[in-house]
Image (cartoon, rainbow, N blue to C red):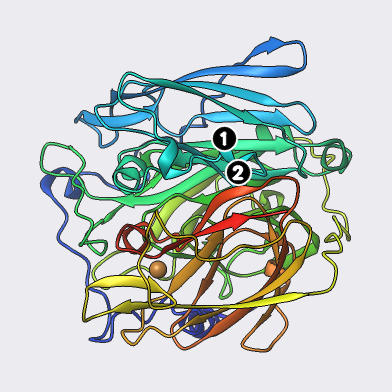
Amino acid sequence: MLNRRQLLRRGAALGLLVAAPAGLIVAGRPSRAEAATAPFTVPLAVPKRLRPTRLPGHDLYRLQTREGDATILPGTRTRIRGFNGVLAPLIVAHRDRPVLVELSNELADPFALHLHGGHVPVRSDGHPRDQIRPGGRRSYYYPNTQRASTLWMHDHTHHAHAENIYRGLSATYLLTDRFEEALPLPKGQYDVVLQLRDAKFDDNGAFVYDMHKPEDRPTILVNGRPKPYFEVAARKYRLRLVNTANERGFFLRLNDGTQGGAELVQIATDGGLLPAPAPTGALALWPGERNEIVVDFSRYPVGTKLVLENLAAFEGETPEVMRFDVVRTAPDASSVPATLRPVPDLGTAQVRREFHVAFDPASGQHLINGKPFDINRIDIRPRLDVTEVWTIRNSDTLGIPHSLHPHLEHFRVVSRDGRAPAPGEAGLKDTITVMAGQSAEIMLRFTDYTGPYMYHCHMLGHQMMGMMGQMEIVK
Ligand SMILES: [Cu+2]
């Protein structure tokens, strides 16, 4: 296990602790409502599971995107945007049982539903051209032919999506399959989704959205609750961490009073289970990423309180994210197998591409290969069933991290700066963050569907300011 100094050094290497070129990122001042909210005063909300109509051959979800009111900071009401007006709901789907979403858009702005990490036909991918106008509806078909993984649903309109996600429009889409169900991992109430993000609230508890001030979002929310506490049994839990923040990266450790922190056994990432469990003392979670861990609370006596901390908190912020309170004992037949799920063979690379990602101070835009997004331009035309290797080079001169998220297909990380990926990145991924001055190689192969799909940085402010491209998958 790493000690605290080693953890911090690793965080610095990941670019999580260094910040803007001028030095540390300094957080904005909390509003009165934020300052009045002490950590660990609100219980964690376990995501509300949406119930489908079960029809022959598929599950039907009728969803509305609409505004609603929620109590986020105690004593205040916040106007939110949510699926069916609620924060962070959950859909549970099974492999080979398709899901049909009939979405009606009750917002004042257009909306386009994207299933992040989904292997879906182009007309169900939420292409910015396929927006639902206010008052309109559209159906989305998810075949669920891919392996079990934690996906999430959000807007992809490309003018309002960052703000929509910020104001709460995000749902977890948990896809299971027989392979995973047969493993002895923690299940049921011991398998918990944790959507992590940050936000800024005004003195009255209303969301404040300013795309240009990502450092001024001092309130950390987990499943829509500010720095909550969660009462757990002294046994193993599977925690599905999803970063739904617009911009913020987390570098997480669970403080159990020891130097290196509690052991986090990472079992899965964006595309599902890793080949083998990867024990660690801390893990990075960048926007759009999912990392799943198993934590064994039986190591701690009832009465123990463990704080999940963000070691990459900005200057002026405190590190707490949430607290786990061990309140009872419980039987535990679960375990983490020594091997989990092999990565599929993606073949031999026949095509190589390079993507240079950087902020351009001259234009104030974030660019891929020197160009901002243009919906009327196709940037690349990958062929169906042909294996490609993409090199992503972050040539940002201001030290800004960037990510790349190709739609439609998961990829394998081949290397980072020429070195093999860490065990926690050895599975299938769909979003990779690269530090300024560094590079990564990924291997992927587009299958089943043709048409125009997007690839982009998942720091949503960067994406809004141009960091997106369009690929047409062709036969
Ligand atoms: Cu970026």
299 left or right of 354 in image: right
472 left or right of 19 in image: right
Residue shown at 77% from the left, 64% from the top: 386
Residue 69 visible, this angle: yes
In the rendered view, would you say 165 is above or below 8? above
In the rendered view, would you say 363 is above or below 333? below
Which residue is disc 1 drawn over? 124
Res 218 quadrant in image = bottom left
Specify the amino acid type for callout 2: Leu
Q: Nearer the viewer, residue 180 or 409?
A: 409
* Label annotation for residue 151: 2
Res 312 quadrant in image = bottom left
Residue shown at 85% from the left, 59% from the top: 344
In the rendered view, would you say 48 is above or below 62? below
Residue shown at 34% from the left, 64% from the top: 466
Judged from the image, the quadrant occupied by ligand 1 is: bottom left
Please tell me how crowded label 1 is: few (under 14), some (14-19), or many (20+) other residues with Cα within 10 Å.
many
Q: Quadrant of the N terminus?
A: bottom right
Residue at disc 2, secondary structure:
strand
Residue 150 x, y percent position in the rendering: 64, 44
What's the distance in space between the residues labelled 1 and 2, CA to CA? 15 Å
Residue 151 x, y percent position in the rendering: 60, 43
Residue shown at 57% from the left, 70% from the top: 258
Specify the amino acid type for callout 1: Ser
Q: Nearer the viewer, residue 283 or 428?
A: 428
Residue 79 x, y percent position in the rendering: 23, 29
